[in-house]
Structures are given as structure tokens and as C-alpha cells.
Image: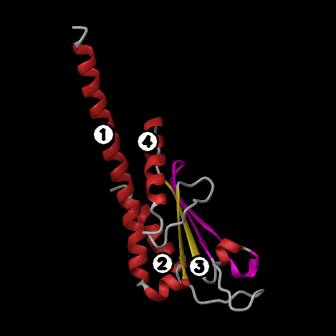
């Protein structure tokens, strides 16, 4: 499909960005916070990478020494898709505790964000984390399209029933 080069670019960039390690806080002893979230030490942050398919679809990958934040902007071509994506993302974010790497609040300008820390890469396989994010990106477009088709078909049925009363 036309999405394959975009997804392959995201996959290779994400795989490279996930070379993270345990790094204790430099200010407070026995603390280990994701540097990409704290952003106090600029020397521990790497350059963020934005991979854009078009103006409506993009991925922001923000790597640091001990964590990576992945933010996804999901394609929304019309008002219905905007509403569907907003509702679907709200549904997922409310269940963020079941998705270990999902952030409760996305980065501004993006619909959903993931935070992968060194603890995740120590307890899970790195390639499986990458596969999860890639599968999510592939499936979210299919889900939104299926939801849109369902809403349109229900709307058609409701309109037909409503118009039967006048005919």
C-alpha cells in the first residue's frame, strides 16, 4: 500500500531510538524519571524526529537517554473523522493503565502518545514494543474507517425510515 514506506520509516527510526539505558536522576538520589518528560538536562535529550506522511498524518519521536516518547497524529479528513478519532482516543486513554506504555495525556497537536522507558525495554522485548506501536498505527486507520462506515450506514437507514413517513 501507499502507507508502507511511511510505516517502514517510522519502524526503523523507532528501532534506532529505542537504544535506551538506565540513567539515574542527577539531582535527586535514588530517583529515575523519564528524561523526555522531565526535560531538565538538555544534554540527556536527543533531537526529536518528525515523520510526516501528509499534513494530517505524522509521528513525533522524542528520544532521550532513558526514555522515548512517541506521539501520533491520526488522519482526519472531515468533521466526522475528527469526532470519531476524539471519542476513540478518549476511550483508549481512559484505559491507559491496561496499555503499559500509553500516556494519559497526548502531546499538544497529536491525538495519542506512548512513553517507553528503560524499564519497559528491560522487561519486554524491544522488537515487540516496536511491533505494538506499528500495529497500533496500522489498526487505528482501519478502526476509524470502519466506524465511519458504520455511522454512515446507520445514518442512511435512519434517513430512509424518517422519509418513509412522508411518502
Work out how far the residue at label 1 is from the one at label 2, CA to CA, in angstroms. 34 Å
Q: Which residues are magenta?
A: 40-63
Quarter of the figure with residue 118? bottom right
Residue at the top extreme of this rendering: 167
Work out how far the residue at label 4 is from the one at label 3, CA to CA, in angstroms. 31 Å
| Mark before the other along the chain sequence, 4 or 3 | 3
The residue indicated by pointer 1 is 149
Circle nearer the viewer, 1 or 2: 1
| Mark before the other along the chain sequence, 1 or 2 | 2
106 in magenta = no
Secondary structure beneath label 2: helix
**Disc sitting over residue 67 in the figure:** 3
Secondary structure beneath label 4: helix
51 in magenta = yes
| In this view, 42 is above or below 8 | below
| In this view, 27 is above or below 46 | below
Amino acid at each position: 500500500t501507499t502507507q508502507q514506506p511511511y510505516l517502514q520509516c517510522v519502524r526503523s527510526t523507532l528501532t534506532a531510538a529505542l537504544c535506551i539505558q538506565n540513567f539515574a536522576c542527577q539531582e535527586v538520589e535514588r530517583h529515575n524519571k523519564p528524561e523526555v518528560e522531565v526535560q531538565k538536562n538538555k544534554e540527556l535529550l536527543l533531537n526529536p524526529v518528525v515523520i510526516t506522511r501528509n499534513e494530517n498524518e505524522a509521528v513525533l519521536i522524542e528520544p532521550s537517554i532513558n526514555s522515548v516518547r512517541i506521539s501520533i497524529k491520526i488522519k482526519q479528513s472531515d468533521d466526522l473523522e475528527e469526532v470519531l478519532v476524539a471519542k476513540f482516543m478518549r476511550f483508549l486513554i481512559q484505559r491507559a493503565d491496561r496499555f503499559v506504555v500509553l500516556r494519559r495525556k497526548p502531546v499538544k497537536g497529536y491525538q495519542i502518545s506512548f512513553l517507553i522507558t528503560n524499564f519497559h525495554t528491560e522487561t519486554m522485548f524491544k522488537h515487540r514494543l516496536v511491533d505494538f506501536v506499528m500495529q497500533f498505527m496500522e489498526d487505528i486507520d482501519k478502526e476509524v474507517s470502519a466506524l465511519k462506515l458504520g455511522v454512515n450506514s446507520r445514518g442512511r437507514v435512519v434517513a430512509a425510515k424518517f422519509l418513509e413517513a412522508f411518502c
